[in-house]
Amino acid sequence: MATTADFKNGLCIVFKDDLYTIVQFQHVKPGKGPAFVRTKLRNVKTGRILENTFTSGIKIDTARIERRPYQFLYKDGEDYVMMHTETYDQVNIPMDLINAPQFLKEGDAVEMVVHADTETPLYVELLPSVVLEVTYTEPGLKGDTASSTALKPAEVETGAKVMVPLFIEMGEKIRINTAEGTYVERVR
């Protein structure tokens, strides 16, 4: 249990039977009436932002969430099998808990956010960018290779489709931003 005096950015609380992290808060003491705290809360599971006002001093349930290192082993039907890199425990994770499953390949390191009290996985985050090999793309037209503004579709080794500049060829490795699913650079 905590009170509004314990609020800080990043604190995870239980609110409306769901987990939220505090993105922003402001203590307000008006000239008339009781003090209150304005907050912006992010739902841990959905990422949606919610604004709420709490009366100053009320008790709030806090939740402990932990970030743990895992490694993706293989896909088992609709689930992804992950292994904790320190304890070697394996756990099956549904695809909807992974932020960019189309860029995940066997052996990749990921970070799993877990509700520490119940040991429930909340979501899995890939690294901000991954390096993947282009397995198929149409050849660029001669003369168009100097411009990086024109894009063409390419398929990478995980089967995901990404738009790449015309100069990218099959067999080359590219860096992909996992949050946006976009091409970043060619990797040599």
Image (spheres, rainbow, N blue to C red):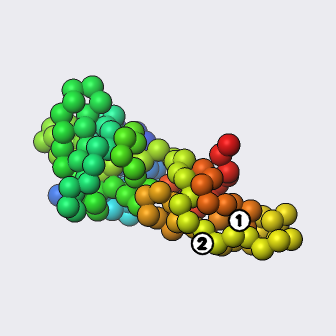
Quarter of the image for the N terminus: give it. top left
Say whether residue 58 is left or right of residue 32: left
Q: Nearer the viewer, residue 114 or 91?
A: 91
Disc 1 packing (10 Å; few <14; some 14–19; many ≥20)? many
Residue 56 bears which disc, if any?
none
Amino acid carrying label 1: it is Pro
Say whether residue 83 is left or right of residue 108: left
- Give the residue at x 29% y 43%: 73
- Give the residue at x 85% y 63%: 146
- Can you give x and y, in whole percent of width and height, for residue 184 in the image? 64, 54
- Residue position for label 2: 153
Q: Is residue 127 visible?
A: yes
- Give the residue at x 29% y 62%: 96
Q: Are marks 1 and 2 in contact (CB under 8 Å)?
A: no
- Residue position for label 1: 165
Q: Nearer the viewer, residue 118 or 22?
A: 118
- Can you give x and y, in whole percent of width and height, for residue 49 in the image? 40, 62
Amino acid carrying label 2: it is Pro
Q: Nearer the viewer, residue 9 or 100?
A: 100
